[in-house]
Amino acid sequence: MARKKFIAGNWKMYKTVAEALSFAEAFKALYVSGPHDVAILAPYTQLAALKDAFAGTGVLVGAQNLHFEAEGAYTGEVSAPMLKELGMDYVIIGHSERRQYFAETDETVNKKIFAALSADILPIVCVGESLPTREAGEASQFVGAQVAAGFAGVGAEDFERITIAYEPIWAIGTGLAATAEQAEDMCAFIRGKVAELFGDAAAEAVRIQYGGSVKPGNATEILTKPDIDGALVGGASLVPADFKAIIDF
Ligand code: PGA
């Protein structure tokens, strides 16, 4: 079965609830549910309001992080069952900003994948190398190790519920996207790694997004590559017309 393309907006720490709702109004006026999956991954404070605002539109909603325990003495954290209660469809796990600023590791990524899957929330698991790693010729080795450690112990059958986002750190928020060829090469490499570790059916089923400075102007060449099943869009997802243009790539 062909994989459905998946365009997701990562709002990071942007927008108040009021701003999120005005985005939703503007976006709903532009967007008609089409062949691709579309989701907005927003700050916790906006999630309930966005779920409500997008009801019946086909736009899915998710969070940008979760804790791996279901409950406990973890001040400031939010769990998978709590997100499920709000009807969350997706959750980002292991974004490079969380790895860099919040001590996220492959081990916590692994635990969070299990927590999301067991609450029936679909994980979008981020991997990607830094510029020095790429310049040293070690990008594939690095990303392959992130995939192996992040997905350790995950069942082959779970990959139909999993999205991997390849986000080279040097391309995030820099305006300097990977070329479509660089993105395709790494997404194909990641699919090969999933095949090696979890089998061909898992590799065929898993969706692999590219993320890092995706804009209306480069969406077509990136999103038409065979191993790129979608995009994780930061900056451009904050503007309704830009996000819509990317979805219409
Ligand atoms: P960007 O961010 O599109 O603003 O580069 C992508 C991301 O961090 O997911």
Image: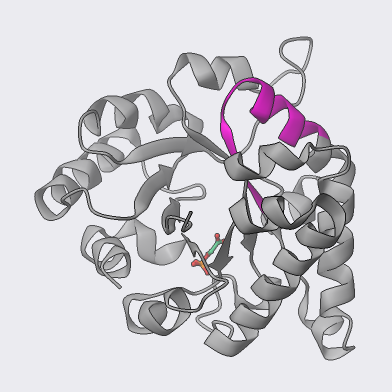
- Residue at far left of view: 29
Q: Is residue 93 above or below residue 214?
A: above
215 with respect to 210 (left or right): left
In magenta, the rendered stretch is 111-125
Residue beneath the point at 72% across and 48% down:
94
Residue occupying the point 77% across, 58% down:
194
**Residue situated in front as seen by the camera: 155 or 145:** 155
In the image, taking residue 230 as reference, residue 202 lies left or right, namely right
Q: Position of residue 41 (x, y in %)?
A: 46, 43
**In the rendered structure, does residue 230 fall within the stretch colored magenta?**
no
| Residue at (55, 67) in percent of width and height | 211
Q: Residue at x 41, y 57 (%)?
A: 7
Residue 206 in sight from this viewpoint: no
Q: How is the image coloured?
A: one colour
On the image, which quarter does residue 160 sit in?
top right
The image quadrant of residue 136 is bottom right
Q: Position of residue 191 (x, y in %)?
A: 70, 65
